[in-house]
Amino acid sequence: MKLLGFVLLLSFLCCANAFNITKILDAYPDYSIFNDDLTRTKLADEINSRKTITVLVVNNGAMASLSGLDLASVKRALSLHVVLDFFDAEKLHQVTNGTTLSTTLYQTTGSAAGNAGFINITDLKGGKVGFGLSGRGAKLDSTYVKSVKQDGFNLSVVEVSQPITTSVAEAPTPSPSNMNITAVLIKGGCKIFANLISTTGVLKSYEESIQGGLSVFAPTDAAFTSVTSKMLNKLFSEDKVSVLEFHALPTYSPLGTLKTTNGPIATMASTGAGKYVLTVSSSGDTVMLNTGINKATITSSLLDDQPIALFSVDKVLKPKELFVAAPSPAPTPEAETPKATPPTAAKHGKSSAASSKSSSTSFAPATARVYRGLLAFLVVCVGVFML
Ligand SMILES: *[C@@H]1O[C@H](CO)[C@@H](O)[C@H](O)[C@H]1NC(C)=O
Ligand SMILES: *[C@@H]1O[C@H](CO)[C@@H](O)[C@H](O)[C@H]1NC(C)=O
Ligand SMILES: *[C@@H]1O[C@H](CO)[C@@H](O)[C@H](O)[C@H]1NC(C)=O
Ligand SMILES: *[C@@H]1O[C@H](CO)[C@@H](O)[C@H](O)[C@H]1NC(C)=O
Ligand SMILES: *[C@@H]1O[C@H](CO)[C@@H](O)[C@H](O)[C@H]1NC(C)=O
């Protein structure tokens, strides 16, 4: 009964706001480059996870001006074309006082300086609407062409004549391989974690992963309570490495991607199917990571520059392979204890220790139940969509 309610709730959440920008644009071959770039930069996930959005698409011919840019630059440029407000043709032609500044996704990445993530929308003479960067004397080179698609008052797709700017995209940024990860983490209040990854050498594994994508969930200094720190200190160094690698994904998964992810994801510590996985779930703008032992919430995005995404989280993530849940009646999360590992335990000893614990086996059926529930609600969603 509870499960049914859960499924109904999920299906309601899903279908109240279920557009798939990739699928929508698939119907328009003229925008195939723009569409491919939305997928490559994962902006599509970010768009799909929003409720109210206007996408300013550019046709294949006009996209030529962005060709040759690296992916991070394309992402910066295209994120200026995703407006966090609803503008259909009518609203565009009736902007209050003829001009307005509107927030784009670029403003939310944290890499936009000042107002750089706003665009200027101005009703030009003769029924034309111009788009440009914010700032005095902005050039409004890009103009409204036509309305492409509209979904209620939630999603609007509008074609504009050319990319709003290439200057944002071409702005020099440090190459991701030169990015100082620890400096960003320290600045973001995750100094203890930054020290841990440096002293254990895990930082090197992170850096080696960058080219193929890297996402890090860094616990804030407040997450390292004395109990948690003691627990970590008790671990053998190889297990400590596993815990730290458990805090990273070998993929670029910005917030929008996490928001549209439901279910288990492999971490850098994953050695095989189902090992050292995190279960992602979200509710509105809150993204949670469940280890099976404890649950952390993403508190902020410290850096999002393809292919690197750095987040802070409010808890140290405890993999069920190394920690056991507190026996019921479950008191505070702090009552969790590390699994006792004999000093002779080698790498292979880890898996046998994990499989012999009842906490990990009792977790599995619960997960299966959630999957069945998710499957059921997906079927409902597909059914509703087909109607
Ligand atoms: C969106 O549509 C594309 C193409 O039809 C598909 O490959 C993708 O899986 C869909 N995404 C979601 C989240 O449903
Ligand atoms: C529109 O212009 C009037 C007069 O200049 C000003 O008082 C008002 O605040 C403006 N409204 C907006 C939304 O900018
Ligand atoms: C938008 O740009 C135009 C042209 O540069 C400028 O006159 C107008 O004041 C700008 N609008 C806003 C809201 O900044
Ligand atoms: C638009 O979003 C609102 C919530 O912001 C939702 O209640 C409504 O059902 C959505 N409308 C459509 C047509 O998707
Ligand atoms: C990265 O930043 C940290 C902290 O500011 C500093 O100690 C370290 O030397 C920097 N590393 C590099 C390679 O610049």
Image: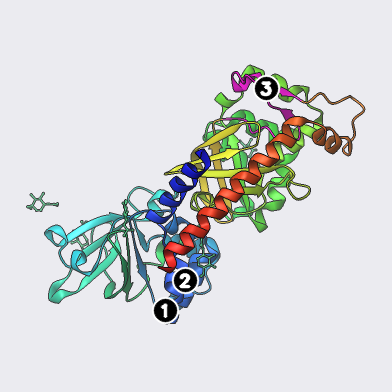
Residue 21 in sight here: yes
Q: Horizontally, is 93 left or right of 162 in the view?
A: left
- Which mark's residue is nearer the viewer, 3 or 1? 3
Q: Is residue 328 magenta?
A: yes
Q: Which mark is residue 326?
A: 3
Tell whether label 2 touches label 1 (CB within 8 Å).
yes
Mark 3 and mark 2: Cα distance apart in space = 48 Å
Q: Identify residue for label 2.
A: 35
Q: Identify residue for label 1.
A: 28
| Residue 178 on image: x %, y % | 62, 51
Label 2 CB-ligand 1 distance < 8 A: no
- Which mark's residue is nearer the viewer, 3 or 2? 3
| Residue type, label 3 | Ala
Which residues, given as a range, are shown in magenta?
Answer: 315-338
Tell whether label 1 touches label 3 (CB within 8 Å).
no
The residue at the point 52 percent across, 62 percent down is: 41
Ligand 3 placement by image quarter: bottom left
| Residue type, label 1 | Tyr
Residue 142 in which image quadrant: bottom left
Question: What is the chief secondary structure element of the magenta stretch?
Answer: loop
